[in-house]
Amino acid sequence: MSAGPAASSSPAPRPRPFLPPVPAPEPGGVPFFPPLRVRGGRNALRRALRRRRRAVAAGLAVTAAALAVSSPQAAERAHPAAPPAPRERGPARAAPVVSAPVRIADAETVRLLRPGDVVDVIASANAPSPGGGEARVLATGARVTRVPGRPGAPPEAGALVVLAVPRETARVLVGAGPSARLAVTLC
């Protein structure tokens, strides 16, 4: 057994070609060039967040406007506006004033009224309750225009008085007449 032929069957490693050494750049020998600016850079995240906030705010504003326009009845119920009294309005009146006939429960009180008087109209429940019942103010600052008298009318039937009030207040007064006892107080 000879070691010679087995050694000759494996190829011998070839020497690599010699590459000349790469010269290092001289200190400070790198030429000056302006820095590269990448679009967006470090402020891209801030801009993206700002755009998202603006989009959310715009979406909320559009939604609020759509809700306000689509449901005027809900807006009126949420913030009921009491009509101002005629004496508080000044020369320019916002709501048209109408004449509303109102039956006051106490006829003797109505005898004290004269045209031009300013009164508040108060309603209480028809049937007396053990707790005393709760009274509520239906109209404030209503002006008396007429006090029609019926000679020989029983005082238990009450007495009629005509008041100048805004249209909405007249609707409330007429609606409360049959179900409540109405009284007036002089202002």
Image (cartoon, helix red, strand yellow):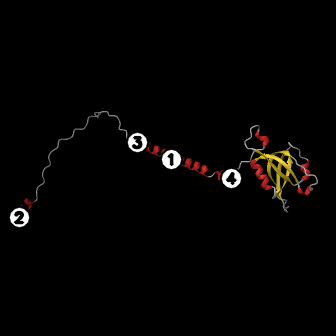
Is 27 left or right of 38, judged from the image as shown? left
Q: Position of residue 92 (x, y in %)?
A: 74, 38
Q: Label 4 to label 1, Cα distance in Å? A: 31 Å
Whether tag 2 and tag 1 are in contact, CB under 8 A, the answer is: no
Q: Position of residue 155 (x, y in %)?
A: 92, 55
Amino acid identity at mark 2: Ser
Q: Residue at image x 51%, y 45%?
A: 54
Q: Label 2 to label 4, Cα distance in Å? A: 113 Å
Callout 2 crowding tier (Cα within 10 Å): few <14, some 14–19, many ≥20: few
First in sequence: mark 3 vs mark 4: 3
The residue to which callout 4 is attached is 77
Q: Label 2 to label 1, Cα distance in Å? A: 87 Å
First in sequence: mark 2 vs mark 4: 2
Amino acid identity at mark 4: Arg
Q: Position of residue 132 (x, y in %)?
A: 85, 59
The residue to which callout 1 is attached is 55
Amino acid identity at mark 3: Gly
The residue to which callout 3 is attached is 41
Q: Residue at the bottom extreme?
A: 1
Q: Nearer the viewer, mark 3 or mark 4?
A: 4
Residue 111 vs 180, above or below: the answer is above
First in sequence: mark 2 vs mark 3: 2
